[in-house]
Image (cartoon, rainbow, N blue to C red):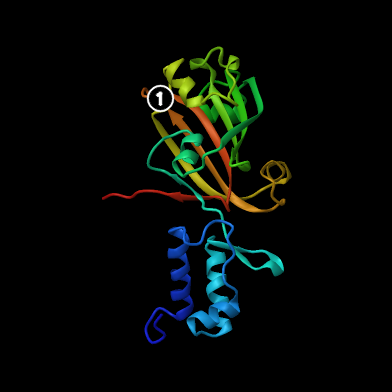
């Protein structure tokens, strides 16, 4: 560590630990050195050590657990706005091995004015509503509300989406798998319903993604709202000129 050049020492210490965490030198749930240990190791003040730890916590690399100390946080799942893939696919690509789905609701409904505008169908059209909790490594990660255009998916209720992939069924059984998706990403605060399902406190901040999925003929096949735990996900996108 060099105390005579920029960036400030607390940022150098933070960068040191980020590199170690990303290279699994410090593993998930492993305890990090205390402020006293950091100040001795790097020959810095306790305040500088505290600022470095605070930066790690603020950026999601670590968390504080009362008097027990500071620990490495679980790695966040990367979700991107570059490729169109099922939710389970994103989890597995990020190294989440044990992926499960709990179906809370799967029903046939008629489109009201709100759903009519989302799926571009007449009011009263037959649609499907599918509500699922996405679970990774025994931890609830997201609540997904999916509305599916019934004009292309007759008989969809016979499938068990706690075991089946929705995208796989749309592709192999109905030939209407979405080829394009238009999405928005917003910050949200979980209400009691979603907080309970995600096992967090009411008012905990997270992210909501909303998107329409289109088939190759530009028909809207699905409209999806996903409530993502903010401590478990990070989002990437690609820009090109």
| Residue 15 or residue 166, whichever sits in front | 15
Task: Count neighbours of disc 1 (C-alpha within 10 A) and say few if under 14, some if 14 to 19, many if 20 or more.
Answer: some
- Image quadrant in which you'd find residue 40: bottom right
| Residue 46 or residue 191, whichever sits in front | 46
Q: Taking 9 as reference, is 60 above or below it? A: above
Residue ID for mark 1: 215
| Residue 70 or residue 91, whichever sits in front | 70
How far across and how far down the image is residue 87, in percent?
50, 36
Q: Taking 158 as reference, is 70 above or below it? A: below
How far across and how far down the image is residue 240, in percent?
29, 49
Q: Is disc 1 placed on a helix, strand or loop?
A: loop
- Look at 39% across and 83% down and name the residue there: 2
The extreme bottom residue here reads: 4
- Look at 37% across and 84% down and name the residue there: 5
- Look at 56% across and 16% down and name the residue there: 156
- Quadrant of image for the N terminus: bottom left
| Residue 64 shown left or right of residue 9 in the figure | right
The extreme left residue here reads: 241
| Residue 3 shown left or right of residue 164 in the figure | left
Q: Taking 159 as reference, is 210 above or below it? A: below
| Residue 160 or residue 129, whichever sits in front | 160
Q: How many marks?
A: 1
| Residue 160 shown left or right of residue 174 in the figure | right
How far across and how far down the image is residue 68, in percent?
68, 67
How far across and how far down the image is residue 194, in percent?
68, 42
- Image quadrant in which you'd find residue 64: bottom right
């Amino acid at each position: 560590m060099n105390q005579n050049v920029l960036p400030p020492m607390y940022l150098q210490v933070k960068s040191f630990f980020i590199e170690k965490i990303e290279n699994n030198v410090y593993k998930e749930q492993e305890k990090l050195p205390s402020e006293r240990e950091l100040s001795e190791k790097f020959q810095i003040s306790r305040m500088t050590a505290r600022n470095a730890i605070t930066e790690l916590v603020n950026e999601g690399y670590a968390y504080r657990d009362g008097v027990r100390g500071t620990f490495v946080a679980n790695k966040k799942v990367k979700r991107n706005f570059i490729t169109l893939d099922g939710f389970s696919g994103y989890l597995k690509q990020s190294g989440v091995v044990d992926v499960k789905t709990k179906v809370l609701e799967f029903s046939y409904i008629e489109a009201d004015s709100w759903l009519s505008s989302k799926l571009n169908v007449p009011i009263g059209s037959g649609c499907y509503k599918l509500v699922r909790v996405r679970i990774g490594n025994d931890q609830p990660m997201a609540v997904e509300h999916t509305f599916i255009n019934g004009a292309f998916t007759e008989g969809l209720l016979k499938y068990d989406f706690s075991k089946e992939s929705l995208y796989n069924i749309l592709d192999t059984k109905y030939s209407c798998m979405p080829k394009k998706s238009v999405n928005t990403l917003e910050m949200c605060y979980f209400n009691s319903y979603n907080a309970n399902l995600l096992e967090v406190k009411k008012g905990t901040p997270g992210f909501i993604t909303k998107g329409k999925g289109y088939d190759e003929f530009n028909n809207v096949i699905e409209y999806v709202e996903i409530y993502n735990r903010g401590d478990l996900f990070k989002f990437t996108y690609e820009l090109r000129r």
